[in-house]
Image: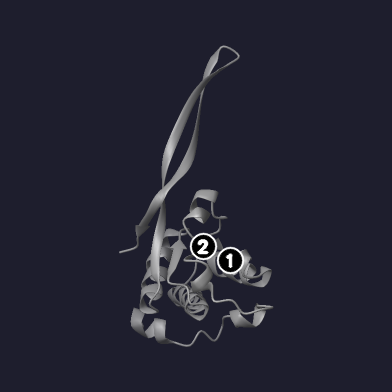
Amino acid sequence: MKTNKELIEEEADFLQAYNVCDSFSAYIQAGEKYSILNLTQHKASEDQKSEGVFDSSEISEEFESEVKRLLTFEEVPDEKTIWQRAMALADYCKELGVQTALIGGASFFMGPLAEVLKSRGVNAVFAFSKRESVEKEVDGKTVKTSSFKHAGFVPAF
């Protein structure tokens, strides 16, 4: 069995990745305009955007599709697939000049993704949110609803 280092360095021949920069109509330096690339399946909240998070869709629809493809696992993945997808996402960040990536999703993928991002000089962070509960009376019954409010970022160690 290959070591993680060998898997990270192995060519990702089976990925159908494309050069992110080729999809720009006018090349932008993402690192200058934004600070945190959202590498999750969810759109960034307004609070997250106000702290510098930008969605992959802000680069291009093609890039957003590629990020979602790399983050989506329809079957139990083997180790090689996990590391290759992590490498592809980290390489995109490096190409774009992104300094920090917001990660979250399949727990089995977050460790390898954070490790490869770090190896490419990109900081990985997780979103931290606080649960806000509100109780209100509806038809004589007390109904409790919860929402989540962005409260900051936690570095992936």
Q: Quadrant of residue 127?
A: bottom left
User: Which residue reaches farthest front?
Assistant: 32
Q: Quadrant of residue 4?
A: bottom left
Q: How is the image coloured?
A: one colour
- The picture places residue 154, in percent across and down from the top left corner, at 35, 56
Quadrant containing the C terminus in the rendered view: bottom left
When the figure is inspected, residue 59 is found, relative to residue 126, above or below; the finding is below
Q: Nearer the viewer, residue 115 or 5?
A: 115
The residue beneath circle 1 is 56
- The three-letter code of the residue at mark 2 reads Asn
Question: With 20 as the anchor, is 105 left or right in this view?
Answer: left
Q: Quadrant of the N terminus?
A: bottom left
Give the CA separation, mark 1 to mark 2.
7 Å
Q: Earlier in the sequence, mark 1 or mark 2?
A: 2
Outermost residue, top side: 140
Which residue is under mark 2?
Answer: 38
